[in-house]
Image (tube, rainbow, N blue to C red):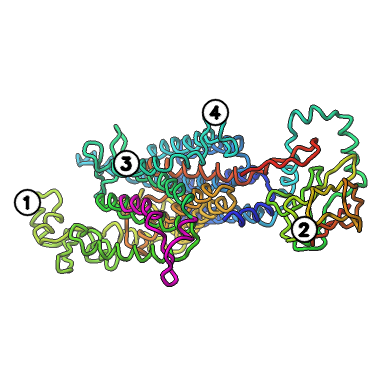
Amino acid sequence: MSSIGAQIRAHLPYQRRNAASFALLIFAMVLTLSAFAEVGLARDGYIPKGLFLYGGGLVVLAFGAYFVQAKFAPYADPLLLPLSVALNGIGLAMIYRLDLDTSEDHRVAAAAGKKLLKDAADAPGQLMWTFVGIGLFVTAIVIMRDTDKPDAPLSFTPKTAQRYTYLIGLGAIILLLLPIVPGIGAEINGARVWIALGPFSVQPGEFAKLLLVVFFAGYLVNKRQAMSLIGKKIGPFSLPRARDLGPILVIWFFCLGVLFMQKDLGTALLFFGLFVSMLYIATQRLSWVMIGMGLLAVGVFVATLLPFMGHVNQRIDIWQNPKPYFDGGCLLESGKVVPVNPDTDIFKKYKAKGSVSPGFSACAELGGEYSDSAQLMKGLFALGQGGVLGTGLGQGEPWRTPLSFSDFIFDSLGEELGLTGLMVLLLVYALIVQRGMKTAVAARDPFLKLFAGGVSFVLGLQVFVIVGGVTRLIPLTGLTTPFLSQGGSSLMANWILIAILVRMSHDARKPAPQAIQDEGMTQIVSTR
Amino acid sequence: MTPFTLTLIKLAFLAVLWLFVIAAVGVIRADLFGSKAAAKAASRAAQPPRPAKAAAKQSKAQRAPQRSGAQHGSPTKLVVVQGERAGTVIDLTGVPITIGRANDATLVVTDDYASSRHARLYAQDGQWIVEDLGSTNGTYLGRTKVSRPMPVPPGVPVRIGKTVIELRK
């Protein structure tokens, strides 16, 4: 692992790219501001007031973040910050745009004396969380010092985390368990992944993701030699000893168990992918990827057989054929799907009885599992409406999709920006992941290599799982779209992730210590 | 707003989106293949962060001729003319250059005949001096073995294992 890094470093001209970073950041600002302007011009015919509040707020935050990065991590990768700011800005513009439309619905509903929608696009909230997220980014950059000076007082570097590998693993489990604890856990939209902290609800899984990367990295860095070299060889596969694999399997099994209980399949898939990819990065054995895929197949198969895992079956069934589930469908034991949408008689019967959710009650009578594919299908309609060039920001009707501001924000953007715009978003994610992997390759320390590789992979996988889900490439599982989706936990966790990558890229790219010229002998200052 | 204007605005925004990505890729490209700005930045970065103590010791009088010497007539590049890294050019900035198989050498040579810290080139009074760092197979300046620090005139080959380097103006 180190030889490639050393070779790349030998060829790499160490340089500060702050000017490039600054120029791209200005570009990202232009992008955000013009998104706001387009929303206003297309919707109302004038530049919206929100441009000054939201656009201005983001400009101030981003430049603050830039100056801190330029001062404390001058050799940092020039792309990470501007790309993240661009995504955050586009997400904010989309949420602002959805908020404009849905808040009107709210007013109408309130005037008619109806109940308000509980979940709605909330642009001021998102701006506040952006503020908190970038605040955490800045704090993390300032607190995390250079890895070369670990003994400075109050220094916390990404490397420090290596000392607390097992504690951090424990922390990840506790974070994942919190939502099931009665009293602080909260179930929102069918998944019990939230904890209520006063007026806020936090998704601890987003933070557990980062802690788990640290745990895997810290553990594998010590055991990777043993895992890749010692062990039985069966055909093309080499299996490591149980004692090397044990702890990691225990943690992994525990996480997945917890997540299945919470019905949070997206995060389960994310952690599983993380686990496999980090084993692969650490041992460089392709057999791990094969074993991982095999385990995944077995896991999904077992889940479809277990009676309390009905929702797994259903997700797969909806993925294959979403139509019967539109606005409500009922999966019977026999595998048949009975529609229970508002047009059916059984739905009307329960509606007449005054049932809170008639479809659900109707399905209970039929003895099946209720589900609704309206989100997925409406999202697909939105994408179809968008086509290649999109309707243009402010000119589509993306609010028709439920959760159009969080899980389905990618479909909302697809409707208004079209395939052309979505490709840009995917490219931006790809570039962030590429910069992260580049940081991992250039990093000097094996722990930091695994850490950087893990966090960038997990970001990429998260985008794949949610974008694949909402475009019906894979079964839909709820995850946030990094930086775009509305939600505080996701923004905070992802900004911390970027801060860690920025710090590590600064450490990897800064020039090696120079020998002092005046002394008679060349003095070699080791960096390892 | 006429539909035509709205379409123009829509297309303009998509164009801005794509330009952003292209600009970002351009930055990576400059990182990989180098650009004028990047090269300048690199040479700036290569200047040693002069330690305060060392700078204080070195009087201005001592430094002045070294600077002027570096500007007139002294070599500006180190070129690898033979060996695996043939074609590599290193700009001479006044920073000592170490050559060897070690990863932290300025010029890393992958050569079984070279030692990990083989030789060092440094500037003194406007001249570049080669010094052998106790290598196993020795360093040769032209055809003489370098047993003590020797000045390297431009164009004279310095042999380290299978690698031959030259200083050029």
Considering the numbered disc 4 on the image, is that residue within a helix, a strand or a loop? loop
Mark positioned earlier in the residue sequence (1 or 4): 4
Q: Chain of mark 2?
A: B
Disc 4 to disc 2, C-alpha distance = 42 Å
Disc 3 to disc 4, C-alpha distance = 29 Å
Q: Residue A176 placed where, x, y %? A: 31, 44
Q: Which residue is mark 4?
A: A153
Mark positioned earlier in the residue sequence (3 or 4): 4
Say left or right for A97 vs B30: left
Disc 2 to disc 3, C-alpha distance = 54 Å
Do the residues indicated by labels 1 and 4 lie within the same chain of the protein? Answer: yes
Considering the numbered disc 2 on the image, is that residue within a helix, a strand or a loop? loop
Image marks 1 and 4: residues in contact by CB distance under 8 Å:
no
From where the camera sits, is residue A93 visible?
Answer: no
Q: Which residue is mark 1?
A: A353
Q: Which residues are magenta?
A: A225-254
Considering the numbered disc 1 on the image, is that residue within a helix, a strand or a loop? helix
Q: Residue A267 placed where, x, y %? A: 34, 52
- In front of the other: label 4 or label 2? 4
The residue drawn where x is 24% and y is 44% is: A187
Disc 1 to disc 4, C-alpha distance = 68 Å
Q: Which residue is mark 2?
A: B88
Mark positioned earlier in the residue sequence (3 or 1): 3
| Occupied quadrant, residue A416 | bottom left
Q: Is residue A449 magenta?
A: no
Q: Residue A174: which disc?
A: 3
Q: Chain of mark 3?
A: A
Dot 1 surroundings within 10 Å: few (below 14), some, or many (20 or more)? few
